[in-house]
Structures are given as structure tokens and as C-alpha cells.
Amino acid sequence: MQLLLGGINPQISDMIALAFGLRWPDAVTMTAVDGVGTMELIAEQHPDVIILDPHFADMSMVSAIQQARQLSDAPLLVVAREGDELEAVKALELGADDYIRAPNNYVELVARVVALMRRINGIESGSQAPLVAGRLMVNPATYEVFLDNRLLELTSTEFRLLQLLMSHRGAVVTYGLAEQVIWNGNANASELVKKCIMRLRRKLGDSSDRPTWIMNVHGVGYRFIGAARAEEEAARFSRTGS
């Protein structure tokens, strides 16, 4: 396994590398102290896991996470400042898969990465069978989504939320369920899910007022309706919103 540590203090990096070496003896740890170096390593080495302290002198947190996500779909864990809840939420909105507050316990950090990899490798059942709804196909085995045979560019979080919705087709996926499955209960679920749904709808060519794929169940969560009978579903659930 290749682990990339970006923006992490060198002494802390050594401790993290030691902790991961105990869990994965063949783990290779790469480090970069600045934003540019971190992005170069992501592009060149394709790490399996990225742990990012995005408070670079040469790059903003927003730019760092966005660039990392453009370069890689690998599990991305962000180190957020202690007590800064808004920063942690923002990191998740930008495409990070999880966050941990600094200073942190290295054993906990390893455990969080293990849990993150398990969640990303399969939602709940771990099924690798493709999910198909009309013109839309989600393939968990390859982490690809196709609409009208066109590959959609989704972040890993967007992919897992869509997979969760499709695997519960016809049933409501509550904010709480999405929080537990995708963010492991570590975020403000309702706001994060809303923002992620907005991005998914934009990429699917969907809308909140006349939904074709994803319908809002006011105050509860979302329901995947697929492309069929969208107008009937819209009439059934008249209280919609983004």
C-alpha cells in the first residue's frame, strides 16, 4: 500500500509512517511539505490513501482538496484544525472522504483509515454487481458511473451516495443513514447530503422541482426514483426542494 502524507509535520509523519507500518508491513509512505509537491506526488505515484493537512503556505485548503480530487479518487482524509467545525464540514463538501482533528492519536488515525477503506470498497453489503436504472449504470467494481453510455466524473463521496440511493431504490435514504454509511457519523449530515445531492443532480442533468432521478422527501432525506414514472413520483411527493 502507498500512503501519501501531504502538509504533515515531518516528525508527525514519521510517527504516522510507523503506525501504518505496524498495520501494513509493506506500506510505503511518501511525504510532501507543500501543496505543489503534494499534487506532483499524487499525479506521479497514484497513492492508495491520501492524508492531507491542507494548510499549505503555497496553496489554500479549497484549492488543495479540489486539485487532489481532480488527480485521484483514492480515499482522502483531511486533518482539520481542532475546534474548527466549519473547516471540517467544508473539507467534506469539497470532496474529502473523512476528517480527523489535530492533534490526533495515531492509532485512531490508522483505525479511521481502515474504516474508510472498508466503506469505500463497498456500501453495507459490499456487493460489486452493477446497479442499472434505465440510462444510468453504477458499477461498484470499477467505481464508474455511466449515463447514456457517457462516463460521469464523480468524486468518491458522490459515487458512494449515488450507490447508496440506488441500492435502496424506492425507499427513503435518511440524512442519518447517509451520515453513518458515508461519513461514519462525523459530520452535519443534512447540510452535507444536500450539497452532495445538488452536485449529483447537476451532473445527472436532474432538478429538484421536476426530479428525474433523485427526489427530496422533505425533512427526512432522499429517494431514488430512476428515470421511469418520474412525473407520477413527483405528484406523490409534492413537497420537494433542494
Image (cartoon, rainbow, N blue to C red):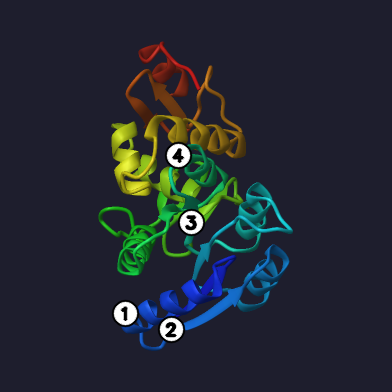
Does 227 sit above or below residue 237? below
Give the image quarter of residue 73.
bottom right
Mark before the other along the chain sequence, 1 or 3: 1
Q: Which residue is mark 2?
A: 27
**Which residue is more in the foreground, 23 or 1?**
23
In which quadrant of the rendered view does residue 237 lie?
A: top left
Q: Nearer the viewer, mark 2 or mark 4?
A: 4
Q: CA distance from mark 4 to mark 1?
A: 29 Å
The percent coordinates of residue 33 (x first, y second) are 64, 70
Mark 3 vs mark 2, CA separation in Å: 20 Å
Which residue appears at 32% of the width and 83% of the height? 22
First of labels 3, 4 by sequence position: 3
Mark 3 or mark 2: whose residue is earlier in sequence: 2
Horizontal side of 123 relative to 70 (left or right) equals left
Q: Which residue corresponds to mark 4? A: 85
Coordinates of residue 38 in the picture (x, y in percent) = 65, 68
Q: Which residue corresponds to mark 1?
A: 23
**What amino acid is labelled 3 in the image?**
Val
Q: Give SS at disc 2.
A: loop
* Residue 79, numbered label: 3
